[in-house]
Amino acid sequence: MDKKVTKVSPADPMDTIENMESPSHGKSLISLHYNEEAVDAENVGAAPVETMTYQQRWIRDNIKMRVCTKFVEKPTNVNSDLLPPVRVPGKGLPGIQSEAEPICRCGYPRSTHGQSLSSGTSGMEDWKVDTHTKATRTNAFGTVEFLGFGENERNYVRVDVDTKMKDMMELMMDVWGLEKPNLLISVTGGAKNFTMKQKLKEEFRRGLMKVARSTGAWIITGGTNAGVMKHVGEAVRDYGLVSASTNPIIVIGVATWGCIQNKEDLTDSECRGKWPASYRLGKKQRPKESFLDPNHTHFVLVDNGTQHQFGVEIPFRAWMENSIANMKTNTGKNASVYVPVVLLVLEGGPGTLETAHQAVANNTPIVIVQGSGRAADILAYAYQNSIGEEIGATDQEGKTKKITQTIFDASVEAEIRNQVEENFGKKNLVRHCEMVKETLKNRDLVTVFEFSIGGRGSSKDIDRAILQALLRANKDQIFDQLKLALAWNRIDIAKSEIFTDDRFIQPSMLFEIMQSALILNRVTFVELLMDNGVNLKDFLTKKRLLKLYNHINKNTQLYQLLDKIRRKNGNEKYISLVDVGCLIQDLIGDFYTPWYLLDPKVRDLDVEYLLDGVSAKCMGMPGIKKGILSMATGQKQETVENELLTSDEYQVPDFDNPFQELFLWAVLLNRQEMAKILWKGGKDATAAALVASGMLNSLSRQTDDTELAKKLKENSQEFSNLAIAVLNECYDVEEKKAQNLLIRELEHWGAATCVLLAVESNNKKFISQTACQTLLNNVWMGHLSLDNQLLQLLLCVFIPPLIFPVIKFKGDSDQDGIENLQEKGVLRDKKRKLEKQKTLSSIPVKEEKEDLQVDYESKPSNLSFWKKLYYFYTAPVIIFAHNVLSYVIFLGLYSYILLVKFNKDVSNEEIILIIWVFSIFAEEVRQVTDRTFSNWTPCSLLSQYSIYERITIYRTSTNQNASHIINPSASNNTQSFRGKNHSFHPPQKMQSSSTKNFNTKLHSYITDPWNIVDVATIFIFVMGIVLRFLRFDSTLEAARCVMALNLVIFFFRILHIFSVHKQLGPKLVMIGRMLKDLLYFIIILMVFVVSYSIAAYSVMYPNSELSIVLVYNVMRLGYWNLYGELFLEDIEREEPDCSFDDSVYSNGSLPRCPSAVSRYAVPILMGFYVLFCNILLLNLLIAMFSNTYQIVQENTDQYWCFQRYRLIYEYYTRPTLAPPLILISHMALFIRWIFGKCSFCLSSQPSDLIKRFSSDKARELVQWENMIADAFMNRLELEEKKNIENRVINTQESIHELFFKLDELQDLQATSGSSGQAPISKAPVNQVVRMPPQMDKRLLALEEQMQQSTVALNWIMKILQEQEKNTRVAPMLEDKRENEKQKKEKDKALVKNTVEERKRLNYKARLPCYPQSLINRFPVPDHKVSWEIPFPEYDPVIYEAPEVKEHPYWADTIDLIFMKPEERIGKIKFNEYDDLNKVNRKSYVGTYQVQDGLPLNPTGRTGLIGRGLLGRYGPNHCGDPIVTRWKRDDIGNVVMKEGKKVLEFVAIFRKDNKLWSIPGGMCEPGQKVSQCLKAEFTEEALGSLVEDSNMEEKIKSDLKIMMEEGEEIYKGICDDPRNTDNSWLETVVFNYHDDTGKVLHPFLLRAGETVEAASWLEVSSSLMLHSSHLYYVQLVAEKLNAFF
């Protein structure tokens, strides 16, 4: 039966096994390879499945536990006193174990096995987990509540040790609902309680929780309430659970079920789980058991059917961590990375060393907390005192690369040995020392956190140390580093570790990171990427923008709005930019047309092709607004589509203004900080802020979420404030340019203006700013000077001849007036002349306009008589005065007719009145159809062009250098406008109001309350006139009433005139607001009025007849009571003033008498009614009015300014003549429009509210605005940094730093006190103050050096005085050198003995993690390596690599390990030459044992059986050539060290374990060792030998001679990590030495295909080499008497 081996991550053993006699914690992994089908538990007493929750059902169906199936009594010689009492549910008292009750070898008593289980012989039968346990339905899962530790419940589950990791991931992600982690922190260290310095403990807790919160990490520990697990739990308690962060801290405890104390509290006999289970931490902890930690969030309790066996969870935890590491983070498809894993080492014993060693072997970075004690301090010391030396090596291509080699000085190795012996004893001393050294072989994977300021290699914060460790592990992979930093959202790490001055990152590499940063709303990362070279024009394509809009969360408001538009437009799958454009237009208003709806390349984009790579089935555009299409193209929809089919619609050009596109995206998503960053980088700061404010304000009105609406309004107000701030800054710098900003046509913002954007978004505060009001003042006065007083204007209105001597014009007073004068006068005259010279198909050329603008600077001449008259009567203020005067006359005429002339005969006055009202109606019609801000007329000539031609025509017409006329026939040459720098300009007919259809204009018209009043007055007037002409007396009176009511409304209309007044204008707003309040109040009031009226009338006049009169009488009673009319005479009326007779009061002779009861009941009811209505409700109304008044009064200026704008705009666009003469103007406009339809085009009329500048002038204006906006934002940021809050934060940091130093000094004092020295304190003068030990030691060293220097100087002086020529050594220096020499020799001897002892103890073959796999060996102590020493607990792991099982030519074809012992006999011949396979199975060390058909490794146990990575059972022969030469300096002399020559040897850098080694290899079948040596050396170290083919033959000849003269150094078993109990390496080592250097000098080392690099290495004991190669190098050095 084949056993499937699952690769696992490195084991992460907690030090739960430390100081344990039994090594059973490393339980064999054999049981993990059997595909044994789990057996469900009996369903006795089980609850119905349908009554369970999904979580209960899933765990019952998928998660198993393991139970013992055969009772095998444990031998009685076991020390039972060490076993804790067993609690058996229902059996005896808790915590008391029956003395006579036997215990099974699984660790559980007989009573827990059940009566039906079979029993084995006592103690003699071999009990194994694989054969004596089975999987069954788990009985421990649910939530656990720790009594006395709050009411928080934690998830827990008991799982079988063989549970599939797929099920575990589904349990955690789907059932428990955990989010994917962005980082996995595996914490290892001491399993027993230990103490740390208080500050270090606080820093550890704070830093661990900081990194977990900021990165969304999972923390995995052993889960028990002891040692490092307890410290992690306390960190969660102190810094995690109390944090205000929304991201929960996930701490998963993986513990052994059999070692949990009080675990029976977690079980449920019905297998339904406990929700919650009550778990109590006892006062006393029993041996071999531990309590669960109450501060972990989740528990996975691993069960293999045994009890009190530590280490069961180690392989399971390794597999689980490996499965988590194979998940990808949720940072977008292109920026997602596999979840990084880091090992955090805190204190610990030998098990911690083993864990750290395995982590580095599997390329997992580790962070060592120095100062925590034991293993962590040993590793930290070794790291800080070793040297990372760079070695130059040659790769396969002949290029030189640097490889870091960790070098340990002999004294450092000796100190490491002393520390290991001091902390862990002499047991396994060599093993532990070598683990320390090999853990540091790759220094990039090791980070030491030293909690001290300025410490060497230290990091101030442990969270930074953890993250830096992960980045260092990927230091050559910048893209992966960026992905990690983005996943963690740690901008500080990205700045300090990735974007450094010595690195250049190609901007194109950052595009995918930028995309993910935008999607994840990583604002600081977006800013950082833009600062480091990401150009948004290169980054943002239509495809990326579409991805951004299609990655919106479905729960957001934006998605719901876009989805509604998408379905309306007929899009099936994706959101298109047309959908976005429609939404933007809906939010801002139809006056604003996004270019998404105008540019055909955007509008007709195949979204499915861009995002899926598959073209859409239908190229039509069924959902596009046909009105917009026809307006933008001038053609039918089918014609446009046919034209677009020929275009390259799949080529996605860059955006001209990418900041604007991303800004709109961020605003729509309500990502305020992201929007502000993009706003700062974009153009048109004021317009962009106004658009954002308007969109957010509209979004707030379209949501029912109160909190979201509040946030949207706040963000809208913030952008409004930014727009106002920028405008005011510009106005302070230069008023003229600021006003140009307000009226400049914004080609990127729907051809609108800032003023229009503010008005349409109802931004009163913006309109009330000085710049806007100054502009409005200029517009209001027209060409009249602002110096004119109101009295002057009114006087001239009544006496026109006074215009010339009294009125001042702008041309007479200031230069600005002169410019406006010529712009609107001279320019228009010249434009008329130009128009006459152009053909019908011509379009005005921008260059001509610019030429005319040059004349603005010239000095103007005096205005003519007619010019002054024209400018006076066309000024909006004069138009307003004339209309007011006309309206007053109109009201007087209307009043006169009603009072005097309204009879059957129609008078002349009535005819004039009718004409007057008709003129008012005509003006209202004109307002509905008016093109707001439009200075265009439809040019139907353009309809003959294609859409591309029209766009090109427009761009050519607005080009500064364009002086030619576009030929309509040149349609094929006008389609190449795409590109990075193209700028799309919509034609004039597409400007602002051009997109308004009739419905939109009508809606805009009726939203103005005064327009509704106008419609009402005209409608009522028409009704009155109709009744007037019916010629009936009754209709005449009805007409009189209607006309009288109409006159009242006409009088109300005059209130609109008051809007211009600063004091009266806001009062109108108050009236409007109060009317709304009154409507709501009336609804409440009518409840009381109706109820009282019906009740009172029913009591007074019961059984009344139903009629209209009844309704009137009922409502009359209650309504007039409100005003004090109590109707007491009606209530108290008696006969004969009234009658109860129906026939009498029905004909109206007498009123009806009220009932007798009503005389008492109704007054009482009336009293309560009046109390509530007159006192309560009316006072409520007064309070509402007061509140409204206060609100409006606080913003009086804003309301008045906004009203004033609307009034000014109305009269700016109104014809000059007032009603009824306005009909003349209407007729003139109609004739002009007819003329325009016939002549295709009209001349443009200049406007004071919208202006199009030349490209250069517009660019200059935009740059000026951006410069001021940037300066304003920079100043704002500086002010924020200087505010009190930031100063307080800086002060707190400084105080924290000060306290840190004080605490460090206190720690030093405490240390000195504990070492027997007195701490530093205030002492009397005569008292000796002892210094801290560190300072004292340094002072002693300095004093000793001074003494030695003094002695040496005295000696030198004495020698000089005696004038002796011979050189002598100072006595003190000589003694010191002698001592140092002896110590150095002692250390070197110790290192040499260590190398030999390591070879003897088979150290490499017992490394925990087997190479190129995730399999862990069974741990074998040093003293139990030999087969002769009994080791009954020995349970090795079976493993054969997949490539070996495929039976290649170099491997045995028979898998002995999977056969039964009797089947193995004779299959392979051992201890002789195997003729069948042509393999020598003899050992160099003699005859080896063969047991049960399997050969046994002569060196002893390795913890693993099978072949592993080796191909042959028994010895696998190989050869290792050591090619050496003497190291020489630049002039050719041999380098000497300590009196010996320095030797160099050829080394290769292996790819598998990243270690240097001798270039050797395995012998092929039938190959001699000598042939193998030469072949492997040439293949791995020399590569292609030399480049010069002429020297190749000579080199090969010299190499052959050198190989023939080689000397055998070693022959025997190789201590290799690939060795197993049944398969091992045996090698023959030859030394080929080139004493003169002539043979090897021309060799160009080059790495072969199987290795990474090759180089000459200096022979030294500090080298860290593969396998036993250092021992072989030592033998060569001894043979040649070289330095080692």
Image (tube, helix red, strand yellow):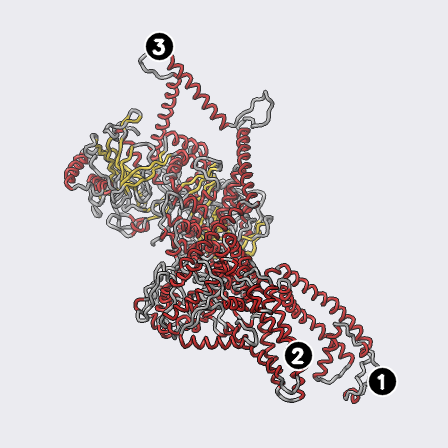
Give the CA separation, mark 1 to mark 3.
Answer: 161 Å
Q: Within the image, what quadrant is residue 1198 found in?
A: bottom right
- Relative to 424, 202 lies left or right: right
Nearer the camera: disc 1 or disc 3: 1
Amino acid type assigned to the residue bearing label 3 in the image: Glu
Give the CA separation, mark 2 to mark 1.
Answer: 48 Å
Give the CA separation, mark 2 to mark 3.
Answer: 143 Å
| Residue identified by numbered label 3 | 1362
Viewer can see residue 445: yes
Residue sticking out furthest to the top: 1362
Amino acid type assigned to the residue bearing label 1 in the image: Pro
Sequence order check: which comes first, mark 2 or mark 3?
2
Amino acid type assigned to the residue bearing label 2 in the image: Tyr
Taking 1312 as reference, is 1087 above or below it?
Answer: below
Quadrant of the frame with the C terminus: top left
Taking 1376 as reference, is 366 above or below it?
Answer: below
| Residue identified by numbered label 1 | 1136
Residue 682 at x, y percent in the picture: 44, 56
Q: How many residues crowd around disc 3 within 10 Å: few (fewer than 14), some, or many (20 or more)? A: few
Q: How many residues crowd around disc 2 within 10 Å: few (fewer than 14), some, or many (20 or more)? A: some
| Residue identified by numbered label 2 | 896
